[in-house]
């Protein structure tokens, strides 16, 4: 297996608290996406809602995946004041979250 050119993905699986409206989720998502404009080491953000028919989501409803060029880039992102401020707001709206950082790999066939 080959790891991709040092890229690192930062993935969150989240379940918002009951009572957090779709409008609030939209605003939080826009705020998350805006971090790409504020934090140089954050290269992109993709997100989506669970659409699986397997019903194995364990209550998690949304996924957020951002891309960084290195694990050091993630460390800079986590410490950045814009992230700290946003994370305090974002996390206060979550019932539960899982965070995983990984280096994408390919399997030669």
Image (spheres, rainbow, N blue to C red):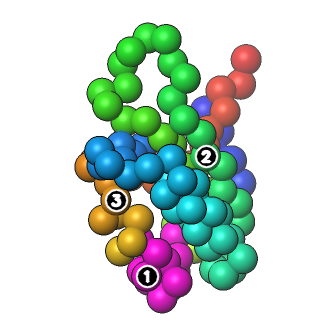
**Residue 18 visible in image:** yes
Quick one: SS at disc 2? strand
Mark 2 → mark 1, Cα distance in angstroms: 20 Å
Q: Earlier in the sequence, mark 3 or mark 1?
A: 1
The residue shown at (34%, 59%) is 93
**Region in magenta:** 74-87
Quick check: 70 above or below 38? above
Q: Is residue 36 left or right of residue 29?
A: right
Image position, residue 106 (x, y; %) = 66, 33
Mark 3 → mark 1, Cα distance in angstroms: 13 Å
- Decide: few, some or many residues near mark 3? Use Cα within 10 Å; few <14, some 14-19, many ≥20: some
The residue carrying mark 2 is 47
Image position, residue 30 (x, y; %) = 63, 63
Q: Which of marks 2 and 1 is nearer the N terminus?
A: 2
Which residue lies most toward the top here?
Answer: 54
- Decide: few, some or many residues near mark 2? Use Cα within 10 Å; few <14, some 14-19, many ≥20: some
Image position, residue 11 (x, y; %) = 49, 50
Quick check: 70 above or below 1? below
The residue shown at (30%, 65%) is 92
The residue carrying mark 3 is 93
Number of numbered discs overlaid on the protein picture: 3
As drawn, the label of residue 102 is none
- Decide: few, some or many residues near mark 1? Use Cα within 10 Å; few <14, some 14-19, many ≥20: few
**Which image quarter holds the C terminus?**
top right
State which mark lies toward you, 3 or 2: 3
Q: In this view, does 9 lie to the left or right of 81?
A: right
Magenta portion: prevailing SS class: helix
Quick one: SS at disc 1? helix
As drawn, the label of residue 85 is 1
């Amino acid at each position: 297996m080959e790891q991709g050119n040092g890229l690192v993905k930062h993935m969150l699986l989240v379940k918002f608290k009951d009572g957090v409206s779709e409008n609030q989720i939209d605003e939080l998502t826009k705020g998350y996406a805006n971090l790409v404009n504020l934090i140089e080491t954050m290269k992109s953000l993709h997100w989506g809602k669970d659409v699986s028919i397997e019903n194995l989501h364990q209550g998690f409803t949304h996924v957020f995946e951002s891309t960084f060029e290195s694990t050091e880039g993630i460390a800079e992102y986590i410490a950045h004041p814009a992230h700290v401020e946003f994370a305090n707001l974002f996390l206060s709206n979550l019932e539960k979250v899982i965070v995983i950082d990984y280096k994408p790999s390919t399997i030669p066939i």
